[in-house]
Amino acid sequence: MACLQRVAFELGLQIAYKLEMPGRIMYAWLMNLFSKMFGNTAKKNMEKDKDGNSPSGENWIGPDGTESGPGVPENWYLSYDGPAPIVEGIYEQNYGVDRGDGAIPIDFYIKKWGIPDGFGKTDYEKQFN
């Protein structure tokens, strides 16, 4: 009986040994699948900074020291104390600017810096004059 148990134990070790590598591959494949299904949330959570912002890795620091790019918070302009950002266009109720996340509400811009050169012609802009 002891011999039979030993053979079964050794057989179990051989099966486990042979399944170890495919098991790891299957585990990695499943983790990759779940990660893609749920939007890479583990990776995104690990990349968040202490404030909970998710940097995209595509941000840059402009010449005036202002962080700019797609990972900048939407309300970046509230704490911005630099010169008036250069306005590049109008997008709905925002000016498209050259820094931050690329947008500042028109009413906020006009109240803080005035009407930018070449703008102020729309009815929406005129109401904040």
Image: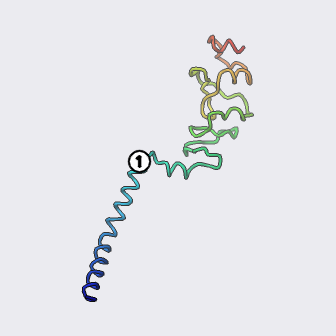
Q: Name the quarter where the N terminus is drawn.
A: bottom left
x and y percent of residue 10 in the render? 29, 81
Residue with the mark numbered 1: 36
Rendered image quadrant of residue 87: top right
- Residue at horizontal 29%, vertical 85%? 6
Is residue 74 rendered to the left or right of residue 30? right
Image position of 64 with respect to 115: above or below = below
Depth order, front residue of 50/59: 50
Rendered image quadrant of residue 5: bottom left
The amino acid marked with disc number 1 is Lys
Depth order, front residue of 19/1: 1
In this rendering, the count of numbered labels is 1
- Residue at horizontal 73%, vertical 30%? 83
Image position of 24 with respect to 115: above or below = below
x and y percent of residue 27 in the render? 37, 60
**Chosen colour scheme:** rainbow
Q: Secondary structure at mark 1?
A: helix
x and y percent of residue 2 in the render? 28, 89
Pointer 1 local density, CA inside 10 Å: few below 14, some 14–19, many at least 20: few
Rendered image quadrant of residue 111: top right
